[in-house]
Amino acid sequence: MGRNGKTRLQLAAQIGLIAVILVTWQLGAVASGSPVFPSFTEVLQSYLGILFGERLLLDVAPSVLRAVSGFAIGVTAGAVVGMTIGYSRPLEPWLRPLLEFLRAIPTVALLPPALLLLGATDEMRIALIAFGCFFPVLLAAIDGTRRVDPLYLDTSRVLRRTRAETLFQVVLPSALPAILAGIRIALGMALILMVISELSAASDGLGYFILQSQRLFRTVDVYAGTLVIGTIGVLFTAGILAIERRLLRWHRGWRGSADA
C-alpha cells in the first residue's frame, strides 16, 4: 500500500472512530433520558447557534482575541529570554533562581492577585495567559539553544560573524524545533487559562458563557460551549502545525536524508 493509500486509510479510521463516538453518545443520551446528559443532536443545534449566531461576537471572539494575544506575548517573551539564557550562560546563575521560583507557582493561583492588581479586565486575562505560556517556551528555548552543534558556532566565529548574526542565523534555526515543541505545549495552556480567567468576574467569553449556562441549568449550552472550545483548540493546533511544517521543511529534509 502506497503512502496515499495509508493516508486515506488513516483518515477513514479517524472519521469512523468519531462517528462511533457520536452515535454512542446519541443512543446513550436517548436511552438514559437524563436532563444532565443531552443528546448529540441537541448539543449540535446549540453549537451551531453559538458559531453562527450573536454569541460568535459576544463570547467566542473575545475569548479568541484574549487567547491569541496572551499566547503571542508569552511565546515571544519565552523564546527571547530562553535563547538569551541558553546562549549567554553566565546569565543563568543570576536568573535561574527567580525563574524556578516563578515556574513553581501554579498560574491559576495568580488569578486572585491579578484581579486585585489589574481588576476584571482584558489586560488581566491576557497577562495571566501570557504568564502561563511563557515557561514552556522558555525551557524549550534554553534546551534547544544549548543543543546547537558546537561546530556551527565555531564556524560562525571563523567567519567573524557578530553575536547577533550568530544568534539569528545559526542558533535560532538550530533551536527552532525545540522552541516549536514548547509552543505546542503553550497552546494548550493558553486555552486552559482563557477559560479559567473568564470564570471569575467576567461579562463575556466562553468561560463566562459556560458558567452562566451551568448556573441557569442550560445543560445543552454547557456541552455546546465546551465543544466550541475544543473546535478552537483544533483550529489553533492545525495552524501551529502548518507553520511548523513550513518552518521546519529543511529540518525534516535533513533528517530524511540522514536516516536514508
Image (tube, rainbow, N blue to C red):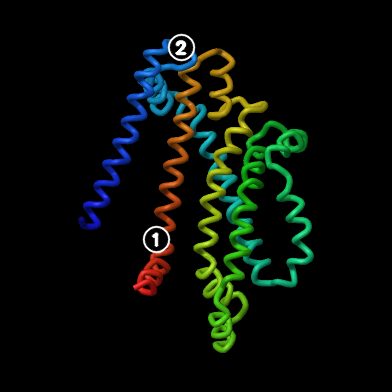
Query: Quarter holding the C terminus?
Result: bottom left
Mark-to-mark CA distance, 2 and 1: 47 Å
Q: Residue 112 in the image: x percent, y percent? A: 74, 33
Q: Residue 36 in the image: x percent, y percent? A: 49, 15
Residue denoted by label 1: 246
Determine which quarter of the picture holds residue 27.
Answer: top left
- Residue closest to the far bottom: 158
Q: Residue 30 in the image: x percent, y percent? A: 37, 14
Residue 39 vs residue 141: left or right? left
Q: Few, some or many C-alpha atoms within 10 Å of disc 2 (few <14, some 14-19, many ≥20)?
A: few
Residue in the foreground of this view, choosing between 174 and 194: 174
Residue denoted by label 2: 34
Asked if 12 appears above or below 254 in the picture, the reply is above
Q: Earlier in the sequence, mark 2 or mark 1?
A: 2
Type of residue at label 2?
Answer: Ser
Identify which residue is drawn at 33% across, 35% down: 17
Type of residue at label 1?
Answer: Arg
Mark 1: which secondary structure?
A: helix
Residue in the foreground of this view, choosing between 33 and 77: 33
The mark total stands at 2
Mark 2: which secondary structure?
A: loop
Q: Residue 230 in the image: x percent, y percent? A: 46, 35
